[in-house]
Image: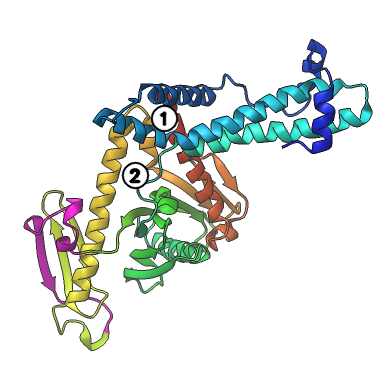
Amino acid sequence: MFRPAFRQLRLSRNLATSRAVRAQAQTTQAPQSPDAPIVQYVRRKIEERQKLQAELSAEVLSDEDIRRVRRIKELEPLQDAWTRWKHAKQSLEETLALLSDPDPTMRSMAEEEYATLSKTVNEMVQCTFPTLLVPPSQTANLSAIIELRAGVGGSESALFVADLVRMYTRAAQSYGWNVTMLNSNVLESGGMKDAILEVKGEGAYDALRWESGVHRVQRVPATEVNGRVHTSTVGVMVLPLTEDAEPARNADDNLFTMDEIKLEVMRSRGAGGQHVNKTESAVRITHLPTGITVSMQDERSQHQNRRRAFQVLRARLMDRKLNQEMIQRRDMRRGLVGSVDRSEKIRTYNYAQDRVTDHRLGMSLKNLTSVMEGDALQDFLKALQQRHHDELLEDVLLQQ
């Protein structure tokens, strides 16, 4: 890590560190304390690995030895990171004494090296260790379904549904995901009473899942003659999407069986030309144990609508299962459970002040247009992902 010339100079000096030198070091970027909770946790894991290695049999491996070997292998990346951290920490301590060296050249090199090493040590504690400790997401490969429904505000709420559909479509496309409108209820005003979007792409669900909740808009409607600001709401629900929809092809997930399904077919309603009211292509399925109902009529054939309906049903049931598991795992963390409550107001879009505020993060962006175009929405998505990662890490540390 050290440049060769500086390494030779450093090794030739007396590395005894005085109180004055330590005081001077505090003016430079302070490295993370070795007593930080995450460092203590990693140290315990390294000690656990060493203990397992000492317990291995010298002869034929038993079943217990095989389990130990597996655990040793699991902890190997953490061991490698710990070794790198200790090496950087030791080099940092050696460089500390040279910050008050009488030689200006040596002192300048030491200050530069100290700053670099401090950054390395901090990054390992703040990024490397957390990445290795937080378990990988079980839904990282899943696509998403976004359901939007007009709430308080009548026609203005329906117009905002259409605005959010555009926002999510543009944001998804910027990530390289494919967006398809599965179902929509378009009104004469141009707004949408409800809509269902399919967002296909790896990581789509994990990135968008925190959009579930009540989105509030404050603006002057086009029909308002007195210039008064109206407040409307839209309910958003983001669901995990897997590729297959039929239960026969997904027996392993135990989400539902056909014995639990009530299937109804009917004629489509609304605009659609001669096809509407001529054939029974619309489908409604009900999951009897939960009462969840899905209706689909946008496709021209009953088979296509049936497939889409089962797809949405599976997504809703999987979302229900994931949320139940989350609540069970985190019943002591009421704040996180609240963040996925579908009745909770999560974000406000204030057109008069050109401001969008996410109430969970306490974060505001003074660029509403960029958010509605899908670009600045990524700032919220990334911040919510980071918050989730931090909470998972805290869960890991609290378990010990």
Q: Identify the secondary structure beneath mark 1.
A: helix
Q: Is residue 178 magenta?
A: no
| 280 displayed left or right of 109 | left
Residue underneath mark 1: 396
Looking at the rendering, the stretch of residues picked out in magenta corresponds to: 246-272
Image vertical order of residue 135 relative to residue 20, above or below: below
Tell me: residue 52, above or below residue 204. Answer: above
Q: Which quarter of the image is occupied by the C terminus?
A: top left
Residue 400 appearing in the image: no
Location of residue 353 with respect to 194 vertically, above or below: above
Quarter of the image holding residue 241?
Answer: bottom left
User: Is residue 208 toward the left or the right of residue 272 in the image?
Assistant: right
Q: Indicate whether 67 appears above or below 323.
A: above
* Residue nearest the observer in this picture, 339 or 218: 339
Can you tell which quarter of the image residue 165 is in?
bottom left
Dot 2: element: loop
In-front residue for pair 199/23? 23
Position of residue 140 measured from the top left corner of the image (x, y, whole percent): 39, 51
Q: Do the residues under discs 2 and 1 have CB atoms within 8 angstroms?
A: no
Please name the residue shown 43% across and 35% down the image.
Answer: 392
Residue type at numbered disc 2: Ser
**Residue beneath the point at 35% across and 71% down:** 187
Q: Is residue 81 visible?
A: yes
Kindly report the distance in space between the C-alpha atoms of the residues bearing marks 2 and 1.
Answer: 28 Å
Name the mark on residue 343: 2
Q: Say few, some or many: other residues with alpha carbon within 10 Å of mark 1 (under 14 / 14 to 19 / 20 or more).
A: some
Task: Choose the circle earlier in sequence order: 2 or 1.
Answer: 2
Percent x, y for residue 128?
55, 38
Q: Amino acid at mark 1?
A: Val
